[in-house]
Amino acid sequence: MPSPLTAITRTVTVAAGRFAPGHLGELTAVVPFELVDAALAETRTVRRLRDLPSRVGVYFLLATCLFPEVGYRLVWDKLVGGLAGMPVASPSAKGLRDLRRRLGTAPMRALFEVLAGPLARPMTPGVRFGGYRTVSFDGCSSLRVPDSPRNRAWLGRTAHHGYPTLELMTLVETGTRSLIGAVFGPTDEGETSYAGRLLHLLRPDMLVLWDKGFDGNAFLRVVTATGAQVLGRLRNGTVTLTDRPGMIEQCSRPVDRPRVGREGRTFPSDRLLVIE
């Protein structure tokens, strides 16, 4: 009687050395070791130590993001769990902290800049409106960070928190939630200031969706200058200035705005269309 099981094999290219089999699990399917080596070489952070080379440090840092609830030692155990029987190092928590400090931020930033971007394929549902790829600014201002002297000097402390918090602003592809870009820093700078640092990632084939709060004239002007289209909510009390196309004005009281436009009508690119 034939077996009901079928064995499927495949050939993969792996790094040389003790971490070759599967090379630290599934992470290498998303972040190939060749890409890691290129980022390390570009940022001049390669150190080929016998037990904890820089390449392994990159995968360790990625794993700490996947398992934020456990300590360094347990993260390491999860990372090398598929290498049973191999002579793999067993570093202490201090050794792993030293590895993280030695690696620094430069190679991780280089990796992010290569990997970040839209993931949707042409036929992926829910990622386009007409011919435009829909993207959005998404921010968070309540990310806690360790209460260290360096973090306090950089971020300060907010009035309602006894610890430093970080503001994160991202540009995402709305259908897949993939990150196209990200910036972060102190919470007192403001959302539009951080979003402004991501404008170089906008393209003419993108439709930017945003909530109220991003509708200031200055920000609207620099976004439309990228060639991207914009669709967003306006705050209550906002009116259009009929004598200055593309400009809006904040009012102290709600006002009646005329209904502008109807489906199928085209509008000049320098006009702000208000739909109620």
Image (spheres, rainbow, N blue to C red):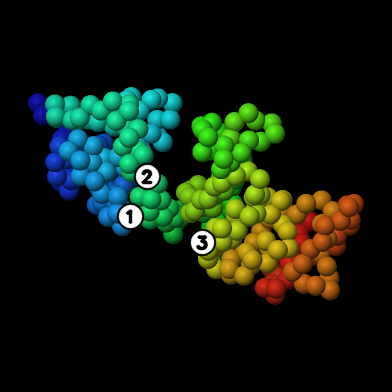
Check residue 201 in the rendering and tell me which mark sits there, or answer none. Answer: 3
Badge 1 crowding class, 10 Å Cα cut-off, few under 14, some 14 to 19, many 20 or more, is some
The three-letter code of the residue at mark 1 reads Thr
Badge 3 crowding class, 10 Å Cα cut-off, few under 14, some 14 to 19, many 20 or more, is few
Please say if the residues under marks 1 and 2 sit with CB atoms less than 8 Å apart: yes
Q: Which residue is mark 2?
A: 104
Q: Earlier in the sequence, mark 3 or mark 2?
A: 2
* Gap in angstroms between the C-alphas marked 1 and 2: 10 Å
Q: Which residue is mark 1?
A: 43
* Gap in angstroms between the C-alphas marked 3 and 2: 25 Å
Q: Is residue 93 visible?
A: yes
Callout in the foreground (3, 1): 1
The three-letter code of the residue at mark 2 reads Gly
Q: Earlier in the sequence, mark 3 or mark 1?
A: 1
* Gap in angstroms between the C-alphas marked 3 and 1: 22 Å
- Residue 27, position as x, y percentages in the image: 30, 40
Q: How many numbered dots are placed on residues in this image?
A: 3
Tell me the residue at 28%/25% (across/down).
92
Q: Earlier in the sequence, mark 1 or mark 2?
A: 1
